[in-house]
Amino acid sequence: MRLVGRRLLMTLPTLFGVLVVAFLLLNVAPGDPVAAMVGERADSATIARLRAELHLDDPLPAQFGHYLWGVLHGDFGRSYITQRPITRDLEERFPKTVQLALAAMLLAALCGITLGAVSAVQPGGAVDRLAMLVSYVGVSFPVYWVGLLLILVFALGLHWLPPSGSGGLAYLVLPALTLGMRSIAFLSRITRAAMLDVLSSDFVRTARAKGLSEAAVVLRHGLRNALIPVITVLGLDTGSYLTGSILTETIFGWPGLGRYVLTAIEKRDLPAIQGSILFMSIVFVLVNLVTDLLYAKADPRIAYD
Amino acid sequence: MRARCILLHTALVAAVACSRAAAGRAGLVYYESYDPRSLDPALSTDVPTGEMVTLAYDRLTQFDPDGRLEPALADRWTASRDGRRYVFHLRAGVKFHNGTPLTPAAVRVSFLRVLAPGTKGGRPWPLYPIAGAEAYATGRAGDVTGMTLVGDSGLAFTLTEPLAIFPKFLAMPVASVVPPPPADPAERPIGTGPWRFVAWQHDDALTFARNPDYWGGAPLTDTLIVRIIPEPLTRAAEFEAGRLSVIEVPFGETARWRAQHPHWLVEKPALRAVYVALNNRRGPLSDVRVRRAINQAVNVPEILATVYGGRGIRARGAIPPALAGSDTTRPAYDYDPAAARRLLAQAGYATGIDLQLWRTAANVELSRAAQAIQSQLAGVGVRVELVERDASSQREAARKGQADMVILDWWADYPDADNFLYPLFNSGSFGPGGNYAFYADAVTDSLILAARRTVDEAARTALYRRIDDRVYAAAPWLYLWFPKDLWAHRPELSGWDLPVIFNGQRWTHARLGDR
């Protein structure tokens, strides 16, 4: 518990750094948030008035101080464009992103680890070669293309699933598969490599010599010990999925964080961008913390102190 | 065998009957490519917001799908002979969705709300012609002097100067009427429009239900769902799966759908113009000979046919053919590279010039057109560097006059030639106002203002044509084309017509089922 507290404390400077960098970058980037507010036709007087009302003409340190003050009080501000509170927007989008991320990770973990473990049992075998093909496809084909292809085949061709949108479980399948594909590929390769490594080690030979069944050897001794690198990849991917996925969400019209951020960036909606970046950083840091704790669980040799 | 046939037949009939029944009950499904800003009319500065506001709210006037001005909340209005004073009479018995009756006071309060500084809406200009509106918006006055109640159903507007097209300004979404006091117009709109608001899941869908008490006749269908689908190919899949009632035909599908599904398609000249703004104040572009040379060096019909799928009409001016004042017979700048070279040489650029052309990946077709223009201009010695930025950066550079050339798409706010002249070529509209070419000509300015003040329709139309002639000769743009909208509708959809302007379709007569 002390460890958790200390690690959480250590994230504060990280988050502050993220805030500062995001704020500065946004302020040097070209593009004017007021331009998106007024649309394609406006008079300069209205633009000047809006800039003043939004404090956009204040000196940068004052703007940042004002923003930081709000954040410290749990107030991420209001979107310039929609005038809705950022926290409400994030509250609405995040559950959708979590849903998609978890589905993708579950799929990735199930398929990836299984494929990897099975192919390690008989390297060069039929399953191994099939797994190799799956991972090549998964890693090298662009998300965009795969997503549209899945829509074409499963929604338009076979009529099994809806092409896009959000709703019941049926809506989750294609986006989760699209999002998780890369992880399936990576996880299966990493599991395979780690398993081969473990299966040729001394304690596995001992286990076999003891007369344990092959299944027990592979699952209890092999897989358990091969899990460390797998958890690393799983953790990193979960972190990035939980912060939203712009491409997958755009293709499938999924109302998650990724699209929210994309729209905010396109419109130069500064409070929305800053709020999302801060929120995503918090999520990422927390996921990393959980991953670290899982290491210790999976491998008693790892201890934090 | 026979028994099986009969069985099969029965099953088929049942299936068809079922699907027919389902289609009869089915709601209409429309889409937007991104989430509207808000449902607050005061914030309607973009097309999705304007379209959604148009479903739930009414204005004093409105446009039909062909862009004709119609009475709406005002069933009649009168203009003074000099065009400076208008009196609008409200339709009797109109109620808001919550039962509150419509009053002239509600109209007045709605307009004040749009203008009030705290609203931060960004689009007060349609109301600026009203005397005192600008002063109120900037906080210099406590009230709008030019807006007064007349009796218990009339509202009078006194304008700062005569403006014949003022009734068209009042059909814009920003002039929608909200009930007093507007509780939460942004998220839970209450209007008088044909559709009552039901729910909004951001970035996903908006749901509307028919307003049975709509003054213009209740919609024929019970529900209208508007889905937010950013990706054009996904939209196409949704449409082909029968889950969208209408769709703009994706450019990549133009040829296939024209060949395979001609009965799905509706095509109409849109009130839009595609052009390259040539910055008339920058370097070689300040010379009219260079600008004309550019117009002659580019083979517009060819680019229109190849890059744009032929979905447009070659522009011979800035006023789209559907609007009064357009001249479709004006001699165009002919594609003539040799003539272009001569013009450049006369201007002293025999060795060629270097220019930047800005484009944004957000608009794929225009981005491709920019590439074609680059290669054709190279043929006459105009070396073009393509500058690719996101829409926001491009807009900022163009507004500040930092771009030599920008390829753009102008959408009408109101169906009148004025909308293609005043913002685009009046020197008072430099930059953010719409004049990205920074074209300044005192005669043009005075003609544009004169047209606005001209009450007589025919005289005004003649003026529009004269202005367009004059501007075209000065070639402030590389004139490209007026897009033709190409949409597809489900075969079972009836009562829907492709609107030439974004707020011209209210879905009241649309229904799915047998025709």
Image: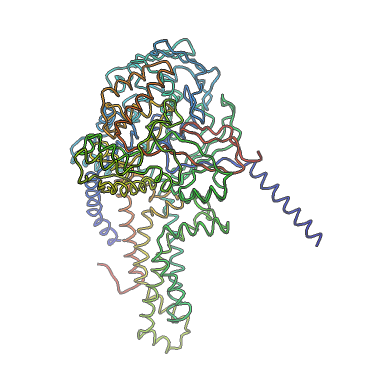
Q: Is residue B349 left or right of residue B275?
A: left
Q: Please tell me which residue lies in front, B334 or B473.
A: B334
In this rendering, is residue B12 above or below A32?
A: below
Residue under the point 51% across and 30% down: B66
Residue B374 locus on image (x, y percent): 30, 48
Q: Please tell me which residue lies in front, B68 or A220.
A: B68
Whether residue B435 appears in this view of the structure is: yes
Whether residue A270 appears in this view of the structure is: no
Q: Is residue B4 left or right of residue B97?
A: right
Q: Please tell me which residue lies in front, B215 or A191.
A: B215
Quadrant in the rendering for residue B509: top right
Q: Quadrant of the C terminus of chain B?
A: top right
Residue placed furthest toward the bottom: A209
Q: Quadrant of the N terminus of chain B?
A: bottom right
Residue under the point 47% across and 83% down: A214
Residue A263 locus on image (x, y percent): 36, 45
Quadrant in the rendering for residue A2: bottom left
Q: Is residue B159 left or right of residue B171?
A: left
Quadrant in the rendering for residue A5: bottom left
Residue B241 locus on image (x, y percent): 56, 51
Q: How is the image coloured?
A: rainbow
Q: Please tell me which residue lies in front, B408 or B470.
A: B470
Number of numbered labels in the structure image: 0
Residue A147 locus on image (x, y percent): 45, 58
